Image (cartoon, rainbow, N blue to C red):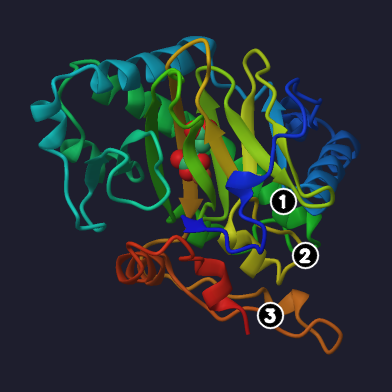
Amino acid sequence: MSASSRTVPQEQLPSEDLHPRPMPVINLGHLSLDSRTRSGVVNEIAKACRDLGYFQVINHGISQAIMDRAVEAASSFFKLPSETKEEYSSDDLRQPVRYDTSSKDSISMSRAFLKHYAHPLSDWIQYWPQKPPIYRDCMGRYAVEVRRVALLLMEAILEGLGLDKGYLKEKFQEGLQLLSVNSYPKVSHGATAIGLAPHSDYGFLTILLTSCQGLEVLDRSSKSWKTVQQLPHALHVHIGDHMEVLSNGQIKTVIHRALLNPEEARMSIASIHGFALHEKVTCATELVDEENPQKYKESSFSDFLDHLTANMDNKQRNFLESLRM
Ligand SMILES: O=C(O)CCC(=O)C(=O)O
Ligand SMILES: [Fe+2]
């Protein structure tokens, strides 16, 4: 993740409204229907990506039970005693599993998180917490399902950019999946209402499952925060830094933040999808020409980790800015 470096600090901008405004909701089931219906959905996704960079998906094929159990596993993990959770603490960003609280990374204002890789599951699951006993099974099932959705979405987004169906398919198939499992307390009197400060996510796209309202996205045209609606059985999707690079700036990364919920403690599970650790992401040559010269340098997830490590205490550690040509 990279913190935003816009001129007005996003922390200081008020949320535009207290009530969620409708956001595009895409029926993913329609992607597998006849080609006319599919291209209608691809166009809807392309428009949402170009205009906003975020949308929600329904009819994605992940059962409510799988989603509920993943949230339950996450919430049970954070209820464990601190000593148990701290077994996973590390300053080394390359550890396969990492637990931390607000203190160290410069964007967690009031958040505890557990981050771990999830694909290929058989390589990583051995490092995941064994407590609570349901964690590996419930989070593993969700991870596999949400990755299937991410691959479907990637294919549709690339198609919407005019790239071939199957563009870089192998690199996406072999790509990494990072789960950021987040826990926020209920807002308490006199404390900051921001759980996670404004930032963008590094990968191509992020799919978020949240237990209750709290996520906000920065609307580029009005420069105001939009509350992300909490629709039953929907998942929220937003574009990350590497999709902006791949599309040569045709679609842009999304600055977002998490507010604490006044009613209840909040859990979220962000599934971030990118290429494999050392695989470089570059602007698609098909989207570069004289009128649209290459706008970003190539980079990998490993380069991103190096950037974060070198800018640990720096709130302006914007990865995407460092790639601009
Ligand atoms: O908790 C949320 O709603 C957002 C989490 C997030 O942005 C992240 O983990 O990168
Ligand atoms: Fe994020």
- Look at 65% across and 12% down and name the residue there: 232
Q: Quadrant of the C terminus?
A: bottom right
- Amino acid under label 3? Lys
The vertical placement of 9 against 263, above or below, is below
Left/right placement of residue 322 relative to residue 152 reads left
- Amino acid under label 1? Ile
- Look at 70% across and 34% down and name the residue there: 15
Q: Mark 1 and mark 2: span between their CA atoms?
A: 11 Å
Q: Indicate which disc, 2 or 3, sits on the residue closer to the N terminus.
A: 2
Q: Nearer the viewer, residue 274 or 35?
A: 274
- Look at 50% across and 45% down and name the residue there: 197
Q: In terms of image quadrants, where is residue 253?
A: bottom right
Outermost residue on the front side: it is 190
Left/right placement of residue 83 relative to residue 210 reads left
The vertical placement of 101 against 275, above or below, is above
Q: Nearer the viewer, mark 1 or mark 2?
A: 2
Crowd around label 1: few <14 · some 14–19 · many ≥20 (10 Å) = many
Q: In terms of image quadrants, where is residue 141?
A: top left
Q: Which residue is mark 1?
A: 157
Q: In the image, residue 264 lies at what x, y percent?
A: 47, 12
| Whether residue 271 can be seen here | no
Q: In the image, residue 70 lies at what x, y percent?
A: 39, 20
Q: Mark 2 and mark 3: span between their CA atoms?
A: 10 Å
Q: Which residue is mark 3?
A: 295
- Amino acid under label 2? Gln
Name the secondary structure under disc 1.
helix
Left/right placement of residue 257 relative to residue 278 reads right
